[in-house]
Structure formats: C-alpha cells, structure tokens
Amino acid sequence: MCLRPGSIAAPRLSFSHSRLIASAVAVFLVGPLFSARTALPVMKTPVVLSLIIVSVLSIRADESPASFLGRVPALPNQSCQVTAADRQPFLSQLAVVKRDLDRELDQRKKALVAWDRAQAASHPKLKKQEADAIADQVLQERFNITREELNKSKKMSKEARRAWAKSVMTEMAATTQTNPEAAKAEQEKNNRLLEQMKAARFAAAKLQAEGVKFAAQLADLQKEFEEERDRNKKADREAFESDGSPPPKHLYCEKYTPRLRRILDDCRVWVVAAMPECIEFEKQQYQMAKMMVEEGNAAIPPGVTNAPKFEPPPAPAGDGGITGLNLVRELVDLLADVYRYDIDG
C-alpha cells in the first residue's frame, strides 16, 4: 500500500457462474438500490465485485497479518558503504518473511476458489436464455418494464432518458401508494444499505490516504536524487571534456539515505497502526456483501420460482484478511530497498 496505494481494489471477477451473475443476479440486486435520485436501477460492476472482495478478506488460513508484521526485522544500523555480505542477513530475513507471506496469500486464495466452486456447484446451471428469461421476469414484476425497454433507454438522449425514467417512477409511485407501509420499509432498507456502502468506502479511503502520502514522499525523494545525479553527470562530463578533470565523489548515500530511512520507519509505524483499520475494512465489506445478498434474494418477486438463491461468504476472521497481508507484504518490499542510495561515486 505504501508504494501502491490503490492496492485495496476488487480482484477480477472469477466466478464460474459469472454469466448468471451478470444476467440474472445483477437484476435481483438492483431492486433495493432503487431511489428517486438514481432514477432507474443500474447494476454497477463494483457492487458485484464487493462480494468478491469480502470473500477474499474472509478466508483465514494459518498466520495473521499482525503475526507476520512481528516477524519483519528492524532496519540495519548501517545502509551506506556496506558490502554484499553486510547486506545479506537483513535481506535474508526479509526473504523468509516474504516467502511465508506469499504462501499464506496463496492458501487464502485457494480457499476462496474452493468456496467459489462450492457455490457454483450448489446452483442450477442455467443457460444464457434461461438466465435472461429470469431477468426479464424480475424486471417485469418488480418495475413493470422489459429488458428491451431498458436497452432502448440506453440509446436515448439524456433528456429523453430522463423523461422515460420519470414516467417509470411515476407509475411505480402510484403502485406504492396502495401499500405505503411496504414502501416505507423498502426505503428504510435502501437507506441502511447505502449507509453501509458509505462505511465500507470510508474504511477503504482511510487506508488509501496514508498509502498515497508515503508513495508521494518516496517519489519526491527519488525525483530529487535523479535530478541531482543527472546534473552532476553533465557537470562531470563537461569538466572532463574541458580540462580532463576526474569526476569528484558524490555522496548520494549520506544525503538521501537518512531521509529514506525516516520514510521507511514512518511507514512501518503506520502499518502497525493500520491493522485495526484493516480489520474494520474487512468487517464493513462483509456487512455490505451480506446485506446485498440478503436484499437481493428478498428482491426476487414471488412469481420467479427458478431463480438461484445466493449465500453470503464466510464471516470474517477478524485479522485484517488479505488487505492486512498485502499491507505487510508491501512493507517488506519497501524495507528491502533501504540500500537504494548506496551508490556513491
């Protein structure tokens, strides 16, 4: 996260039944998200992917992120003018932690794949035409529109699309007036889901903000070094061409390494402090996914009898999940770069 602040992101959709999710379940999930502000329900990819995110975060294997963090060695006392033999103990310790981290990440991903396959095996295998038929039935019974009408609306001008959406909303509003209590309950569920989505986004944003800060500090330091190195190379070349003067010794390591070490130390402190935030992120993602699955299943109209029901992923282990592991993994990569500026000359 320190170097790649965008690492809190959804993995690629890999469900073997992704066609079913795209054509049928997506429609089931849009119902609770319908509101006057959105005009018409549209299933966004991140909504489905949030189910995948929480699946990854919820699988627990052998060792927690905090345990790995405790194994990360302190920075070496010296990182300037050191030999390869001097570097080896520190780098070897990091390599062992990195190897075990990769194994842990691999185990959790394999557990996710196993859970994914079990989910796929428990659902009927529908052909595209069958899934589309279910989606059509849901749209008709829940919103009184057809998939063809929905597709046509995408080709309309903005004004025409708004007018069409308004007519659909007006018709739905007239229907809900016959059962105001049900409409009120539906709106309350919408509000709870939206609040949960905000909480999940907030938890992710807190983690990413610090990652952006450290990435910027490292980029600025590297840019300053490269600019000075290029200036020195040019001056040295010109001096040599002018009077044959040998290039002076440029003490890059003494100048840049202390600042690099401060950034690395600060990043380590932040990663330790961020473990509770990783746990909170894991929790919020799971709650959002659980609510989406529950609301999506509940949104299936009674007349739709052959639609598959989906189960939420396993509850989070409460250790920070893959988000926490990736954070420690990137810290390890970062610390291994402590000798970056040991290139005086």
Image (tube, rainbow, N blue to C red):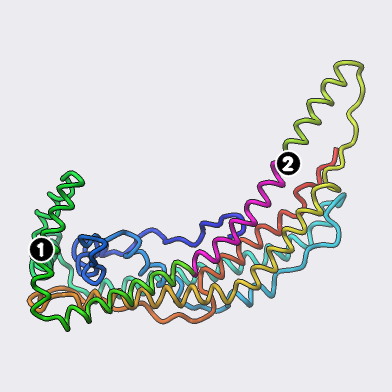
Instruction: Say whether disc 1 or disc 2 marks the residue closer to the N-terminus.
Output: 1
Judge from the rendering whether residue 35 lies leftward or rightward of residue 94; answer left or right.
Answer: left
- What percent of the width, then of the height, locates residue 292? 30, 74
Q: Quadrant of residue 233?
A: top right
Which is more foreground, mark 1 or mark 2?
2
Residue 107 is left or right of residue 47, and the answer is right
Q: Name the quadrant containing residue 209.
A: bottom right
Residue 175: percent from left, percent from top: 8, 73
Residue type beneath disc 2: Glu
Task: Please say if 44 is above or below 302.
Answer: above
Pick the quarter of the image with the N terminus. bottom right
Are the residues tagged 1 and 2 within 8 Å (C-beta)? no
Identify the secondary structure beneath mark 1.
helix
> What's the CA distance linking mark 1 and mark 2?
59 Å
Residue ranking furthest to the top: 242
* Residue at which label 2 appears: 224
Span of residues in magenta: 203-223
Number of dots carrying numbers: 2
Report crowding for label 1: few under 14, some 14 to 19, many 20 or more residues within 10 A (C-alpha).
many
**In the rendered structure, does residue 22 fall within the stretch colored magenta?**
no
Which residue is pictured at 86% across the width and 52% down the height?
82
User: Is residue 14 toward the left or the right of residue 295 in the image?
Assistant: right
> Callout 1, which amino acid?
Asp
The local secondary structure at tag 2 comes to helix
Q: Main secondary structure of the magenta part?
A: helix
Quick check: 156 above or below 109? above
Q: Which mark is residue 136?
A: 1
Q: Position of residue 105 (x, y in %)?
A: 52, 68
Q: Position of residue 95 (x, y in %)?
A: 68, 62
Which mark is on residue 243? none
Look at the picture and state if 171 lies above or below 345. below
